[in-house]
């Protein structure tokens, strides 16, 4: 009888973490660069006298690590690896502007004597960025943006100065609820209900999302963020002969989700998860291999 064909694993197909409580998947990753499930052990040796070789060798501990390189960023990754579930925003065909909020001082965002609100003027001109409004005088403001990445949307715009100002001249904020537009940015400023009287150099901020079909946001690094233990299914690529391999790691934990941004390259995140003993399963992982008919 001839030898059997060797058992061969090829490539990577998916990584699917799941809740250890319910068994439900958090999600799955298919755009994976590299993956490995490393089991590295340590040995203790007994040596003595002039013998150059040990008299005995025994195994001590084994470290089980799951390493992956993701080339996609899904909501569940932030929840599992950074301890915070992102908030899925409501898509808007007309765009979204956040509430204007005082940053330095208290006079700019003021319903009576400052800016009562910022709102959508021309939706097609809304440009994705964070904005700063600075009081140039008691009743006029300069506006700044943090990025020009979306300035070609709608009316094409440019920074007016190296200070990242987007208004060529200060905008007068009208009294008694009057309005003034930030030219070319789709944003309308509404003055307070009384006489506008801001303190020079006070600032306020707001954020803009243009018309969109999906958006998410989250703030990470809070003291209440929790990093869940999870199980994970790692699937090798399906071979041309139909063979498939599944690795089920029962109990894992990982902390951190690096976001690499490189020149003219797709971003990827390298994750290392520690696998450890699961008393319910009496083990660390299971492996299944199948050669379908």
Image (cartoon, rainbow, N blue to C red):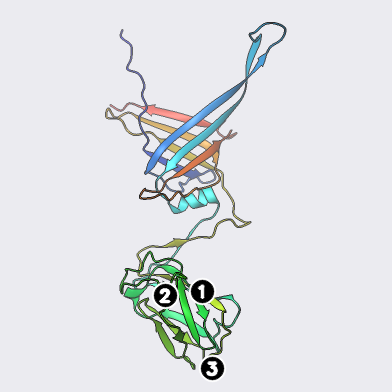
Whether residue 290 is visible: yes
Which disc, if any, is residue 166?
Answer: 2
Give the spatial CA distance, label 3 vs label 1. 21 Å
The spot of residue 226 in percent (x, y) is 59, 51
Q: Which residue is mark 1?
A: 205
Q: CA distance from mark 1 to mark 2?
A: 14 Å
Tell us which disc is closer to us: 3 or 2: 2
Residue 57 falls in image quadrant: top right
Looking at marks 3 and 2 on the same chain, the residue that comes earlier in the sequence is marked by 2
In this figure, which residue is indicated by the disc labeled 3?
195
Decide if residue 283 is in sight here.
no
Image spot of residue 140 (x, y percent): 49, 86
Judged from the image, the secondary structure of the residue bearing numbered disc 3 is loop
Do the CB atoms of the residues marked 3 and 2 lie less than 8 Å apart?
no
Q: Reading the chain from its start, which is encountered first: label 1 or label 2? A: 2
Q: Which mark is residue 257?
A: none
* The quarter of the displayed image where residue 56 is located: top right
Marks 3,1: beta carbons within 8 A: no
Label 3 to label 2: alpha-carbon separation: 25 Å
Say which residue appears at 30% left-offset and 28% top-offset: 292
Taking depth in this image into account, of 39 and 129 the one nearest to the observer is 129
Report the mark closest to the observer, 1 or 2. Answer: 2
Helix, strand or loop status at disc 2 = loop
> Element at badge 1?
strand
284 displayed left or right of 211:
right
Residue at the extreme front of the image, as rendered: 162
Q: Is residue 266 left or right of residue 206?
A: left
**Quadrant position of the N terminus in the picture:** top left
| Residue 231 at x, y percent in the picture | 51, 40
Q: Is residue 289 above or below residue 118?
A: above
Q: Earlier in the sequence, mark 3 or mark 1?
A: 3
At horizontal 44% and vertical 65% (from top left) the residue drawn is: 89
């Amino acid at each position: 009888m001839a030898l059997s064909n060797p058992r061969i694993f090829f490539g990577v197909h998916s990584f699917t973490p799941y809740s250890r409580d319910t068994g439900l998947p958090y999600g799955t990753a298919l755009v994976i660069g590299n993956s490995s499930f490393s089991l590295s052990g340590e040995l203790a040796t007994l040596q003595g006298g002039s013998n150059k070789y040990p008299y005995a060798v025994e195994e001590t501990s084994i470290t089980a690590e799951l390493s992956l390189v993701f080339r996609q960023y899904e909501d569940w990754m932030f929840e599992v690896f950074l301890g915070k579930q992102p908030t899925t925003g409501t898509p808007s065909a007309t765009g979204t502007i956040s509430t204007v909020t005082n940053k330095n001082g208290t006079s700019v965002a003021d319903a009576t004597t400052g800016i009562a609100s910022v709102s959508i003027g021309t939706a097609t001109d809304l440009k994705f960025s964070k904005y700063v409004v600075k009081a140039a005088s008691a009743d006029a403001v300069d506006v700044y943006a943090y990025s020009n990445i979306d300035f070609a949307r709608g009316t094409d715009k440019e920074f007016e100065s190296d200070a990242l100002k987007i208004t060529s001249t200060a905008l007068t904020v009208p009294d008694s609820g009057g309005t003034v537009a930030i030219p070319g940015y789709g944003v309308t400023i509404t003055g307070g209900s009384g006489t506008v009287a801001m303190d020079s150099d006070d600032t306020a901020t707001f954020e803009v999302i243009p018309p969109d079909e999906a958006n998410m946001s989250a703030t990470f690094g809070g003291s209440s963020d929790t990093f869940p233990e999870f199980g994970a299914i790692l699937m090798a690529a399906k071979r041309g002969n139909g063979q498939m391999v599944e690795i089920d790691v029962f109990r894992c934990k990982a902390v951190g989700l690096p976001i690499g941004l490189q020149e003219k390259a797709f971003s990827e995140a390298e994750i290392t998860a520690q696998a450890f003993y699961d008393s319910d399963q009496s083990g660390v992982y299971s492996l299944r291999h199948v050669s379908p008919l």
